[in-house]
Amino acid sequence: LMIRRPPRSTRKGSSAASDVYKRTGPGVTTRIFSGDHAMLSVVRINPGAESEIHSHEQEQWGVLLSGGGARIQGNDSIDVSAGDFWRTPPNVCHAFRAGSEGATILDVFSPPREEYRIKGSGVGTQTKSE
């Protein structure tokens, strides 16, 4: 069985404005899909890498798709494995530290993070162009 996909620019439901890649830190990248009321972010974290501790106004849900690591939220650090999920309320500091296999996470933000609609780098409201 062979599956052929059209180029991203011609795929139904995908456009340059809604399919954005960002580097959010050393060893941390994300591919972002944005709608009017929610935003999906597929985050890949290299083995041993850690996302920057940050907070934002949006509610965030996450599920660990593969790999493992530690979810840091507020003053807690909790080991997680594939299939675990979590909720981060608005304005709560959080981060993720990948284990030896790295990690792939699906994050959902509501409402969308405006700074994530723009290609570049960084997790905060100030992004750097690439």
Image: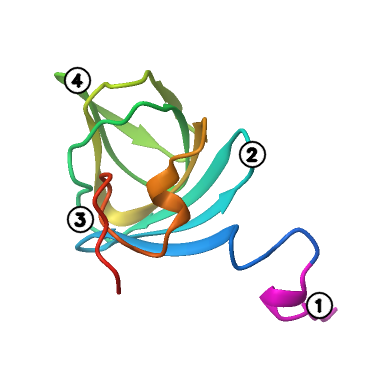
Q: Can you give x and y, in whole percent of width and height, for residue 13 in the image?
A: 76, 58
Is 10 included in the stretch rendered in magenta? yes
Question: Residue 36 got which mark?
Answer: 2
Dot 2 surroundings within 10 Å: few (below 14), some, or many (20 or more)? few
| Mark 1: secondary structure | loop
**Residue with the mark numbered 1:** 3
- Indicate which disc, 4 or 1, sits on the residue closer to the N terminus: 1
Looking at the image, is mark 1 or mark 2 nearer the viewer? Answer: 2
Give x and y (percent) for residue 120. 33, 65
> From mark 4 to mark 3, how far is it between C-alphas?
19 Å
Residue located at (23% from left, 48% from top): 51
Mark 4 vs mark 1: give the one in front: 4
Amino acid carrying mark 2 in the image:
Asp
Label 1 to label 2: alpha-carbon separation: 30 Å
Residue 74's mark? 4
Side (left or right) of 24 relative to 111: left
- The amino acid sitting under disc 1 is Ile
Judging by the rendered image, the residue that carries numbered circle 3 is 49
Q: Is residue 27 left or right of residue 65?
A: left
- Range shown magenta: 1-11
The secondary structure type at the circle numbered 2 is loop
Question: Within the image, what quadrant is residue 114 found in?
Answer: top left
Most common SS among magenta residues: loop
Q: Where residue 123 sits in the image (x, y, percent)? A: 28, 48
